[in-house]
Image (cartoon, grey):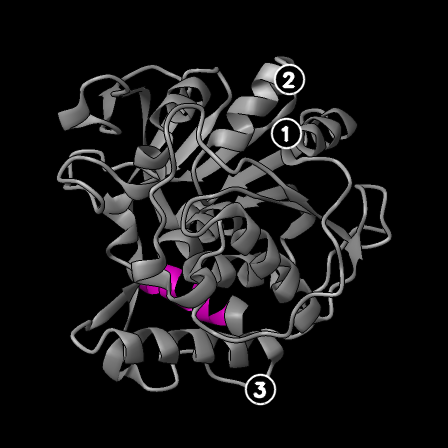
Amino acid sequence: MKTVLIDADPGTDDALAIMMALNSPELDVRGITTVGGNARLADTTRNALRLMEYLGVPVATDQHGPGLPVSRGSAQPLRGRYHYGYYYHGAAGLGVRLPSPIARPAVVRAPELMVRLASAFPGEITVIALGPLTNIARALDLEPKIAEWVTEVVAMGGAVEVPGNITPCAEFNIYNDPLAAKIVLGSGIPIRLIGLNVTTRTYFERDEGAWVPGGSSTARLSRRILSNWFRSRPDARQYQLHDPLAVVAAVRPDLLTYRRASLAVETEDASQLGSTVATYGAGPAQVAVAVEVEGAMATVVKLLSASGSRPKQP
């Protein structure tokens, strides 16, 4: 079982990914940190709290529990401002109505929670990064030793050798904080980069019907999210599973093929801002270059259909 922290900007596909992680017997989720990106920080944090309460997962005020801490992170990137994705994800960034949360975020902010968890589990914790990498960059600034303590960062991001989805050359998460991406990808932390070249190959189709079978709370909410998304985008034929594939990579790394690389991110040239370039050979990163689509999709459906979303901490 992997000890993991999820850093996310929920976001419809973030919500699916978080539910998958909570349902996975292979992952012990120790915390969720939020960041601006798909929506404003206030919305992404409320969405995470709403999700926990809908699933019946207790929310803790710190990493010592009982329950799962949900910690607010960065409202703005290291430089500039976030470009939000409400146009894609819908109202409040989630596209579905869930009750207002009663639980409150953890007392500590995201970078500090990251440092605390990494120091408590040195050499054991994996960060699944589903949004801009701002929180991780701030955690590195707060405590550089976190680069030694974290086992790896599995990051959904980058458009390596494929077109971007926010500009012709940049992927949304990297574009939203290219400076943070440059810091994190160059920090020496082992990185597995799950980019658009593989995430765009995993998707639900409009005409599939139920998408996620079963009566579990995660299956029902998954169907609501997907149904509302397709209803709001009548011309869309596919819902691409960007963030869920990052969870698949954490649970079943054998379903993806990787190449060792060093990564560079453009932070100055406005026309190329956020472009991610891999130099293959040596380096601290593994860049996903292929995915076994059938197995990945089966894993997504299995984890979203499962019941009993609970943190596995004692």
Residue depicted at 73% across the width and 70% down the height: 56
Callout 3 amino acid: Gly
Disc 1 or disc 3, which is closer to the eye? 1
Q: Is label 3 in a helix, a strand or a loop?
A: loop
Do labels 2 and 3 touch, CB within 8 Å? no
Q: Earlier in the sequence, mark 1 or mark 2?
A: 1
Name the disc covering residue 215, or none.
3
Name the disc covering residue 34, or none.
none
**Nearer the observer, 68 or 197:** 68
213 on left or right of 175: right
- Residue indicated by mark 2: 142
Callout 2 amino acid: Leu
Mark 2 burial class by Cα count in 10 Å: few <14, some 14-19, many 20+: some
Disc 2 or disc 3, which is closer to the eye? 2
Spot occupied by residue 200 in the image (x, y as percentages of width and height):
24, 54
Q: Is label 2 in a helix, a strand or a loop?
A: helix
Residue 7's place in the image compared with 255, above or below, is above
- Magenta stretch, residue numbers: 294-302
Q: Earlier in the sequence, mark 1 or mark 3?
A: 1
Q: Is residue 147 visible?
A: no
Spot occupied by residue 67 in the image (x, y as percentages of width and height):
80, 55
- Residue indicated by mark 1: 111
Magenta segment, principal secondary structure?
helix
Q: CA distance from mark 2 to mark 3?
A: 43 Å
Spot occupied by residue 41 in the image (x, y as percentages of width and height):
53, 46
